[in-house]
Image (cartoon, rainbow, N blue to C red):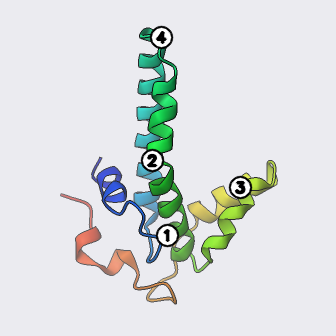
Amino acid sequence: MNWYITVLRKYAEFDGRARRSEYWYFILVNFMVTLLFSGLGLAFDFMEMGNVYSLAVFVPSLAVSVRRLHDIGKTGWNYFWVFVPIVGWVILIVYHARDGVVGENEYGVNPKDQEDFQLYE
């Protein structure tokens, strides 16, 4: 849950790098919240509830995806692979699953090296 909050705090921050855990935990919690709102929308006959939530987290989702691409040394423009049917999604999943560049790259320091990005113990 901490990674989800971290991404929301960096609402429109497209510069820098994002760890795999930051990206994938955000995606997991985002998916569960979307399912929750969709279920509540069915129960209360208000299907737009899930759509409103998805619209609210669109910019943070895009920002964390771009930062994740930066972590592997790719430019944020690689996000446009999403518009290529099937193949583009596979390429993005592979990119997002790769380990980040060790050390500093052109987009900043490795978030694994920074103290404030460590998981809470």
Q: Residues within 10 Å of mark 2 (few under 14, many from 20)?
A: some
As drawn, 104 above or below 72: below
Q: Which mark is residue 93?
A: none
Relative depth, front residue between 99 and 44: 44
Residue at the image point whose x is 42% and y is 50% from the top: 26
Residue placed under numbered mark 3 in the picture: 82
On the image, the x and y values in percent for residue 37 come to 43, 26
Q: Check disc 1 and report the residue beneath it.
A: 67
Q: Are marks 2 and 3 in contact (CB under 8 Å)?
A: no
Q: Position of residue 31 (x, y in %)?
A: 48, 37
**Eyeballing the image, is 60 above or below 99?**
above
Mark 1 to mark 2 CA distance (whole Å) = 15 Å
The spot of residue 76 in percent (x, y) is 60, 72
Kind of residue indicated by mark 2: Val
98 displayed left or right of 3: right
Give the CA separation, mark 1 to mark 3: 16 Å
Q: Are marks 1 and 3 in contact (CB under 8 Å)?
A: no
Mark whose residue sits in front, 4 or 1 = 4
Q: Residue at x 79, y 48 (%)?
A: 86
The mark lying in front, picked from 2 and 3, is: 2
Amino acid type, residue under disc 4 in the picture: Asp
Label 2 with label 4: CB-CB less than 8 Å: no
Give the residue number, with chain letter if any, for mark 4. 45
Q: Are marks 1 and 2 in contact (CB under 8 Å)?
A: no
Which of the marked residues, 1 or 3, is nearer the chain's N terminus? Answer: 1
Tell me which label, 2 or 3, sits earlier in the chain.
2
Q: Which residue is mark 2?
A: 57
User: What SS does tag 4 mark?
Assistant: loop
- Choose mark 1 or mark 2, whichever is in front: 2
Please, what secondary structure does the residue beneath circle 1 have? Answer: helix
Amino acid bearing label 1: Arg
Q: Secondary structure under badge 3? A: helix
